[in-house]
Amino acid sequence: MLKVTSLSKTFRTDAGDVHAVQDVSFTANDGEMVAIVGASGSGKSTLLSMLGLLDSPDSGSISVNDTELAYLDARGRSDYRARKVGFVFQQFNLVPNLTAIDNVKLALEFAKWPKDERRARAESMLTMVGLDAQKISRRPSRLSGGEQQRVAVARAFAARAGLILADEPTGNLDSETGKRIVELLRTTATQEKATVLVVTHDQAVADQADRRLRIVDGTLTEIA
């Protein structure tokens, strides 16, 4: 379970302070997909960066399965990013010179999975997201955008991370493919018992989530 309490982040600029995230609190349960909706500049990507420990809050706390992230040292933060959280990006961010299966195996290597278990786990995840045996041996350039995003989803879930952070995961896809990717995120969250946060500006994507939160000028509210 993810628990966020009174999280705040301010950026100092020449034009003045920018309160990117202001006193944000919410929880998200295992197996649940939560959408965070907001316009560009609303603070949603900043919030996601803090949850992934890519940035640090000025105040507040983040707890994942009763582990308080603020108390982690540098090694603990690195371990968290490698083993406890998975990322799905708009740009896919696959390693171009590796095949689909090797991209997923690389995530398992970073997570320190036993070497003799990596291929079977990678194949299992790629099958789960709908890639056949022929396509898992292709490099990203030989896959469609939707297929590349499926590989990214498989990679995010592969190490059994408890938290998946998806930043505009359908932004480079057509609407029908995007819908299938969001359905895949939701189904896989249930199967893997992971919490999935999807940041999006697309209301159609948000409507597929179990719960919806809206962020405006760094302030978060739940949408009934």
Image (cartoon, rainbow, N blue to C red):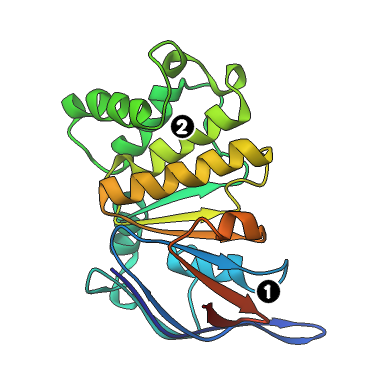
Query: Which is nearer the eye, 117 or 168?
Result: 168
Q: Residue at x 43, y 14 (%)?
A: 137
The x, y position of residue 209, in whole percent, is: 48, 59
Q: Dot 2, how many residues are within 10 Å of its Cα: few (below 14), some (14-19), or many (20+)?
A: many
| Inter-mark Cα distance, 1 to 2 | 29 Å
Above or below residue 176? Residue 48 is: below
Asked where in the image residue 33 lies, by quadrant, the reply is bottom left
The x, y position of residue 77, in whole percent, is: 34, 63
The residue under label 2 is 151
The x, y position of residue 149, in whole percent, is: 53, 36
Q: Which quadrant does the N terminus fall into?
A: bottom left
Q: How many marks?
A: 2
Helix, strand or loop at mark 1: loop
Q: Amino acid at mark 2?
A: Val
Above or below residue 178? Residue 64 is: below
| Earlier sequence position, callout 1 versus callout 2 | 1
Q: Dot 1, how many residues are within 10 Å of its Cα: few (below 14), some (14-19), or many (20+)?
A: many
Q: Residue at x 53, y 27 (%)?
A: 147
Query: Which is nearer the eye, 10 or 221?
Result: 221
The x, y position of residue 212, in whole percent, is: 51, 69
| Residue that lies at the very extreme toward the front in this rendered image | 224
| Residue that lies at the very extreme toward the right in this rendered image | 15
Q: Amino acid at mark 1?
A: Ser
Helix, strand or loop at mark 2: helix
Q: Residue 148's mark?
A: none
Q: Residue at x 63, y 37 (%)?
A: 176
Asked where in the image residue 194 lies, by quadrant, the reply is bottom left
Q: Are marks 1 and 2 in contact (CB under 8 Å)?
A: no
Q: Residue at x 32, y 41 (%)?
A: 110
Above or below residue 89? Residue 121 is: above
The residue under label 1 is 42
Asked where in the image residue 31 lies, by quadrant, the reply is bottom left
